[in-house]
Amino acid sequence: ADTITVVLKGISNIASDTNKVYLQIIAFNDSSEYLFEDGPRELTNANKISALSYLDGLSAGGYNIEPWEDICRALESDNVGQIILLSSSIPSKIEGTCVGKEGKYAEIIDDYNRIVRSKTMTGSLIIDSISLFHNFCESSKNYENNNWLGLMSSGAESVCTHIK
């Protein structure tokens, strides 16, 4: 079964004169599955329809999600300005290596985003989260006392939203 944990990556090239937006959807299950295997694509009506179709084919409920590698890669990329996490579950790991540091993923991502990335021309990575069914934005609002999506969206311009 697929899980509906998804990352949408809005990418623009700051060095160019155009303000194109690029899209990639990554479904996390036992491994990452990409909408566009050859990398993000420019947001067009056709690609938007493909994205909505892809999302419609996913189902909620996976438990072995591993979003960290893709989130950490996005964090280090100058081409990624925003990611949106949509999840109904919890990652199977909370600790590991990200941006060359070992520890809790959420803490490493927040520190790197605030201390390192915010001082670059790219600026902070906006990480918005949507928690489906169970509220993983706030630890006191779910059965696992887990707020991983809230932690991921702790940046100044980021927000975590719960949808029942």
Image (cartoon, rainbow, N blue to C red):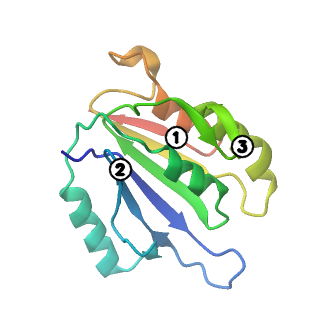
Residue 27 lies left or right of residue 14; in this view the side is left
Q: Earlier in the sequence, mark 3 or mark 2?
A: 2
| Location of residue 80 (image quadrant) | bottom right
Query: Which x, y percent locates residue 56?
Result: 19, 57
Q: Label 1 crowding class (10 Å Cα cut-off): few <14, some 14-19, many 20+?
A: some
Q: Residue at x 47, y 25 (%)?
A: 147
Q: Residue at x 18, y 45 (%)?
A: 1
Mark 1: amino acid: Val
Q: Label 3 crowding class (10 Å Cα cut-off): few <14, some 14-19, many 20+?
A: some
Residue 163 lies left or right of residue 2; in this view the side is right
| Location of residue 138 (image quadrant) | top left
The answer to whether residue 1 is above or below residue 25 is: above
Q: Which residue is mark 3?
A: 112
Judging depth in this view, the residue of 26 and 125 nearest the camera is 26
Q: Residue at x 62, y 39 (%)?
A: 97
- Residue 57: numbered disc: none
- Element on which disc 1 rests: loop
Mark 3 vs mark 2, CA separation in Å: 25 Å
Mark 3: amino acid: Tyr
Q: Which residue is mark 2?
A: 31
- Residue 159: numbered disc: 1
Mark 2 vs mark 1, CA separation in Å: 26 Å
The answer to whether residue 71 is above or below residue 164 is: below
- Element on which disc 2 rests: loop
Query: Which x, y percent locates residue 162?
Result: 37, 34
Q: Looking at the rendering, in which quadrant would you find the C terminus?
A: top left
Front: mark 2 or 1: 2
Mark 2: amino acid: Ser
Mark 3 vs mark 1, CA separation in Å: 18 Å
Q: Earlier in the sequence, mark 3 or mark 1?
A: 3
Query: Which x, y percent locates residue 144?
Result: 37, 17
